[in-house]
Amino acid sequence: MPVQNAEIAAMFDQAAELLEIGGENQFRVRAYRRATREIEGLPKAVTSLLESGSDLSELPGIGKDLAGKIADIVKTGHFDLLDMLKRKLPGELGDIAALPGLGPKRIKLLYDKLKARTLKDLRQVIKAGRLRELRGFGPGIEKKLLGALERPQAPKRFKLSVAEAEAEALVAFLRGSGRAVVAGSYRRRRDTVGDLDVLVTAKNGAAVGNRLVEYENVAQVVAHGPTRTTVMLRSGLQVDVRAVPEESYGAALLYFTGSKAHNIALRGLANQHGWKLNEYGLFSGKRRIAGATEKDVYEKLGLAFIPPELREDRGEVAASRAGRLPTLVKLSDVRGDLHVHSDWTDGTVPIAGMAEAAQAQGYEYIALTDHSRRVAMAHGLDPARLARQIHEIDRLNEKFKNFTILKGIEVDILRDGSLDLPDSSLAKLDVVVAAVHSHFDLPRQAQTDRVVRALENRHVTILAHPTGRLIGERDPYAIDMDAVISAALKTGCYLELNSEPDRLDLNDFHAHAAKLAGVKLAVSTDSHSIDAFQYMRFGIDQARRAWLTADDVLNTRPLEKLRKLLKR
């Protein structure tokens, strides 16, 4: 089975982490991180690009050296540099790196100052109270680490983007066996997925199972029966494939899509009529009265079809019965992207290239929001460079027809809530995206006050990735999101739903809370490369889970209406 993009990206990401722990040159570390993002965002498999003769070194952020390493990984399935770094890494620092709240700098401090080489060493250091000797290790981190060390390891969950790559390849492989669809939390588009539930319409279930075990990406066959086969893929993702008859397809899809709470609510409705609902159909006695399609089952229960993203038992059944289900936002509703980077800071493509890629998406506008000077590693913009960039954008806009680059900045929120650039610079911009990039460990009230103060600056338009989470890598910082939402409403600011698969921040709960409060959201990609515009679909998935309509999303407006909303 060809090595998948997600596997290559994971190898590069881990190599970057280990290089940073080892004190490697930061430019080399950044190169691997940028390559990771580029590989994750590619719309085609690396293997197919190589087979077609494409030169990977021409991809932004790759170059000849990394292109050669990628080709070697595809050929051998191994990354020699990563294997060497793992051997070289002392003790169990790789395992320590997997703990929450620890980045490379903190791991290096633990090793250099406290000689913590193993998980056992770390436990002893924490219990002896020595962790507090290190700057930046407060009681909150100590408690989080101790909890992670003492609790059993939770089953691994996979980011939606990684699960999607696995699911699409698998469905393509199984398609000859019958109609194949992935159900479960994947179909509900949760931000992480524990396993894949695949349904295939087929009369011969054993043949479907036989086909699955021949899939080259299978690492282990867990179970192989007449109607259900379970395998473990190389990535560690478990897959359950079930063969279902056509007459039960809708009921099975409904049942295995879930959620469990949603299914219980539906069974309760069926019971009120004296019916029985299960994965085989909706039955009155022994007679199947619905089950071939999900729509048939819902209609028989007196409900309008409920989109999979809403099936979490959060009021969707009552809303369906009352005819009050929202018309959810669609990817085709999006008219532009309000958080985009270029090679002026840490993006990989010139401004003109990002604009051309956005036009290829059918967009009417983008907001160019490169970093401000506080993000030194990204070569952030100071007032003088920002002024030059504004001039460059004006020059480019003169050339465009029916497309506009909005002038913007992703400005850092400093520790005290002030902003990284003066008001005189921010006043020249169409969009000011404010973001927290440092001091993630502030106490909850201090972090909240910091963000609220930033929103009170009359030039701020949007709060970017509001909780700072990186899925599976960094927990959200402590912040009162209800207070932040209230401040956004009071000041006329908007909140971002960041579509980057590592972030998906805001989560669906907070995005829904913002909607209920009357605060609109910008669904943005935070694109650092051309291919990253593809991330918009993940943000729209999250927006749909939050019950958002097109009216709730800022960047579904045409430019003229958007400009009015951008003015404080």
Image (cartoon, grey):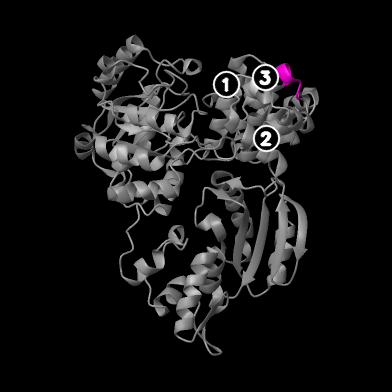
Predominant SS of the magenta segment: helix
Examine the image and state in which quarter residue 305 appears.
bottom left
Q: Earlier in the sequence, mark 3 or mark 1?
A: 1
Query: Could you tell me which secondary element the residue under label 3 belongs to?
Result: helix
Contact, mark 3 vs mark 1 (Cβ under 8 Å): no
Q: Give me the residue at 59% from left, 48% from top.
A: 163
Disc 1 marks a residue whose amino acid type is Arg
Confirm whether the magenta stretch covers residue 264: no
Task: Residue 332 in the image: state x and y as whole percent.
Answer: 35, 49
For discs 2 and 3, the disc positioned in front in the rendered view: 3
Q: Nearer the viewer, residue 358 or 317?
A: 317
Q: Which residues are magenta?
A: 111-116
Q: Give me the residue at 66% from left, 47% from top.
A: 156
Examine the image and state in which quarter residue 215 appears.
bottom right
Q: Residue 30 — which label?
A: 1
Residue 368 position (above or below residue 524): above
Give the residue pinned by disc 2.
Answer: 98
Task: Residue 356 in the image: state x and y as whole percent.
Answer: 36, 30
